[in-house]
Image (cartoon, helix red, strand yellow):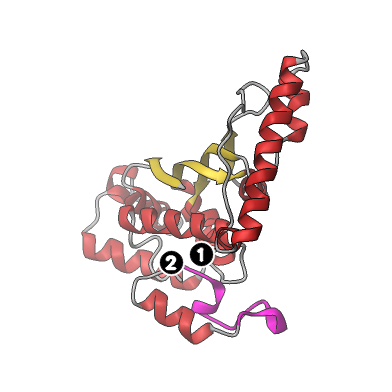
Amino acid sequence: MDVRLLASTPEAENLVVAAARLCYSSSSFEELLTWPEERKSALLRKVLAAGHLSVLEHASFTFGVSGISRACSHQLVRHRIASFSQQSQRYVNASGFEAVIPPSIAAHGEALRRFESLMEEARAAYAELLAMGIASEDARFVLPNAVQTSLVVTMNARELRHFFTLRCCLRAQWEIRELAGKMLALVQEKTPLLFAGVGPACLSGSCPEGERGCGRMKDVRAAFAAGTIP
């Protein structure tokens, strides 16, 4: 899995602070954008603590994601306040596709052999259909969820925080949790104040999963406090 931050709003934190100040100020935009750094940091922390998150929507982040499965991408695109451009199986030939192998299968010899055999069958069936003159938009119906794909993904800072709350949770599926962890590390490096303390919901409150929770809240909090993502 390869995840890169391709672009982001210039001076995103400064812009968010200016937007927050505008709500309560008659200052010009030039004045709103020029404020001592310590005051900007204090106001941004206050805005985040108060939950006034609409101003975060002015900052956006664009990621290049490759090497994830179609199964993972199907989960990713459910986050509707985002923009996605995905590699097309209709126009991009998938012959010899690479497959994402779940760790549980990779660690199980018999399961891995069956998995790899099935992937070869899918590759062969796809190639045979194309050779018969079947259009790729129809031949792709034999391709499995394991096929690797690539996307460009754009989210604003508010939606990203929500995304991390859901997908950094240990109850999230392993692949999208790994993706979320890589994305979180990138934006925390780029704009640390906007994403300070961000992670699964249990970092700041009770587990929203209730009886279906992982039961490892203390471990999760300790891991994020240490700067690692479990």
SS category of the residue bearing label 2: helix
In this image, 68 relative to 121: left or right? Answer: left
In this image, 195 relative to 162: left or right? Answer: left
Residue type at numbered disc 1? His
Above or below — where is 47 with respect to 132? below
Residue visible at 34% across and 55% down in the picture: 191
> Which residue position holds label 1?
52
Between 52 and 9, the one nearer to me in the picture:
9
Residue visible at 41% across and 82% down in the picture: 222
**Residue 227 falls in which quadrant of the image?**
bottom left
> Which residue position holds label 2?
47
Magenta stretch, main secondary structure class: loop
Q: Tell me, yes or no, if residue 75 can be seen here.
A: no
Please tell me how many numbered marks the rendered image carries: 2
User: Is disc 1 in contact with disc 2, using a CB cutoff of under 8 Å?
Assistant: yes
Above or below — where is 145 with respect to 227? above
Chain part drawn in magenta: 198-214
Q: Tell me, yes or no, if residue 142 can be seen here.
A: yes
Cα distance, mark 1 to mark 2? Answer: 5 Å
The tag on residue 69 is: none
Between 214 and 134, the one nearer to me in the picture:
134
SS category of the residue bearing label 1: loop
**Residue 117 falls in which quadrant of the image?**
top right
Is 208 within the magenta? yes
Residue visible at 57% across and 62% down in the picture: 174
